[in-house]
Amino acid sequence: MTSGHAVVLRSYPEGLPRATDFEWVPETTSEPGDGQALLRILWASIDPAMRTWHSAKPGRGVVRPLGTVMKAVAVAEVVESRNSLRVGDHVVGSFGMREWCISDGADVTRVLDAGIEPRLGLGTLGHIGLTAFAGLHKVARAQAGETVLVSSAAGATGALAGQIAAAAGCRVIGIAGGPDKAAICRTEYGFDICIDRHAETDLVGAIRAAAPEGIDVFFDNVGGPTLDAAMQNMNALGRVAICGTISVRSSEPGHGPRHERLMLDKQLTVQGFLTSQFEVDYPEMLESLSLLHSEGRLHLREVVVEGAENAPLALEQLLAGEFAGKVLVRIAA
Amino acid sequence: MTSGHAVVLRSYPEGLPRATDFEWVPETTSEPGDGQALLRILWASIDPAMRTWHSAKPGRGVVRPLGTVMKAVAVAEVVESRNSLRVGDHVVGSFGMREWCISDGADVTRVLDAGIEPRLGLGTLGHIGLTAFAGLHKVARAQAGETVLVSSAAGATGALAGQIAAAAGCRVIGIAGGPDKAAICRTEYGFDICIDRHAETDLVGAIRAAAPEGIDVFFDNVGGPTLDAAMQNMNALGRVAICGTISVRSSEPGHGPRHERLMLDKQLTVQGFLTSQFEVDYPEMLESLSLLHSEGRLHLREVVVEGAENAPLALEQLLAGEFAGKVLVRIAA
């Protein structure tokens, strides 16, 4: 028996999740049985997708009952093992926002190679890096010399997408919320240009000014009016990878300009993707990411939140656009 | 000098083209000079895309001056030649809605194999067949066992797309305007089901009833509310090929429900395509089409309009949904 705590879902969010939709409660973890291992969570990740995971009407169909542990990707250390996991290994999986858990191994997506900083397994060398890489290379098939636009460019996924695009020989333009984030994209992440969308009343014109030759690839984390403005600037045969839609309500997406006529005239491809659809390619993509990381080409700001009890507030703040970079919860690291 | 007639553009259409936007005028064709050939037009094609070709604000950027000959795909016989075209050959190209023309060969997209009925070069074994094939196989990558939905199913492209899908082992559902067209799709074109959209107030529900297991591929010729209804029924990893958007105004596409959230949750791909982007694949696609045609698997109703002078009215009627099948203008056949 191990005594710890967990964050549980107390009420379904109306719109975006609020800290008050969750509660920090004691949780007792039993001894691992046959085929099980006891994991101590070191770090957990705060991701925009968590709003979907905790909705009463999630588009992907899985409704989590009230009282269940907040779903979160985490990295953990194997403390005791009665299965193939080795004590001392660092493993990544959807272990939830808690201090301890029992794993049968099926929830482990990856064992980190020795020497990898555990928290990198939640960012550059984890699901964030994989998402950025998959969207840019597998979905949008960005080519050297093309112009790539990235929305929510100071967010973890956007920042990596921009740097992966630059490393592939693309010209990279970001859209970020506020002058500080735009400056970070230019100076720390090496975007050629970053538009501060709070300072622009005409986003269509701002993108056109930044890319007079048009956009070939749009890596979108936002949707809504940002997507509409980008669509007006796409070049013929352009590709849009929809990675996130933070500006669009899940249950009531609302209305916007029709794009089908433009998509026909310009021969555009718009594709929504989840990183999991490229699971078979993870080893190859991680190899590429590791190489870029070792070359110092992938930089990512980290915001460290201390303690899982502060995760619900951190999610609320992330969704409000208050952070720049990868938001990590330190639990036992 | 050869005396003939041509249809010329007299006024830019407001909305869809009307017969009165064109005029039938005498046209004198000079003798072919060095590198030129004299062509007698046998058949010309009436296509929905002609509305775009004659717009004052075409999405694809080419504005035809008033007074120019109506753009049309046609099949012609080579009557005199001072270039590599051989007298007696049947050639396909954008020769325009006229009786005679001079060709330098650059406007010839294809010389028909001996023995091919000339008018087939404008339909099943021409740009219509290529469009249906490319949309289904190159864009949407339909697989055996999948469910394919086709809009404007009684139109030439839709009818062929449905039959090509059926030949590939797909279950095929059509949407057509009116009971007669729906019946033609079922009995002549072999669609498993065809929805009469005029008889349905709830198109989302009608598609769901026809495909309770969901839609994998949507071949869309219509856009607008038809596209919206199909989107609500797409399966995860579904593909939408946008071939036409007849229900959407070119210059003012209007507003509709946002699809980006749905596209992300369902991992959908929506792609607008022009057949010309697959030009390198034409020989391979024509071989497949010829084989299917020779096996009797591609049937296409023809509506024959007598005389190029009647082409403008035929275009107006086509765009009003008055025809089922391939609309051909007989000029000198």
Image (cartoon, coloured by chain):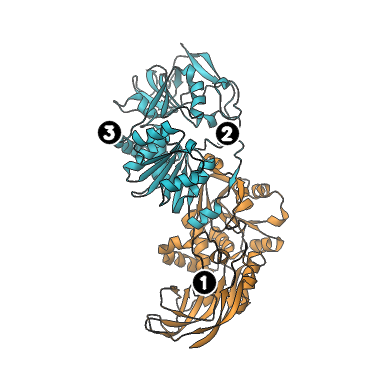
Chain colours: A cyan, B orange
Residue at the extreme bottom of the image, as rendered = B1
Disc 1: host chain: B
Question: Residue shown at 59%/53% (left/top)?
Answer: B253
- For the C terminus of chain A, the image quarter is top left
Pointer 3: what residue? Answer: A294
Question: Mark 1 falls on what kind of element?
Answer: loop
For badge 3, the amino acid type reads: Ser
Does residue A29 appear in this view?
A: no
Q: Nearer the viewer, residue B132 or A151?
A: A151
Q: Is residue B286 above or below residue B7?
A: above
Which residue is under mark 2?
A: A58
Image position of B316 with respect to A160: above or below: below
Q: Position of residue B53 (x, y in %)?
A: 53, 66
The crowd level at tag 3 (other Cα within 10 Å; few <14, some 14-19, many 20+) is: few
Q: Tell me which chain the residue with mark 3 is part of.
A: A
Q: Is residue B280 visible?
A: yes
Badges 1 and 3: C-beta atoms under 8 Å apart? Answer: no
Q: Chain of mark 2?
A: A
Under mark 2, the amino acid is Pro
Residue A75 position (above or below residue A136): above
Question: Which residue is identified by label 1?
Answer: B73
Distance Cα–Cα, label 1 vs label 3: 56 Å
| Residue drawn at point x = 37 percent, y = 43 percent | A172
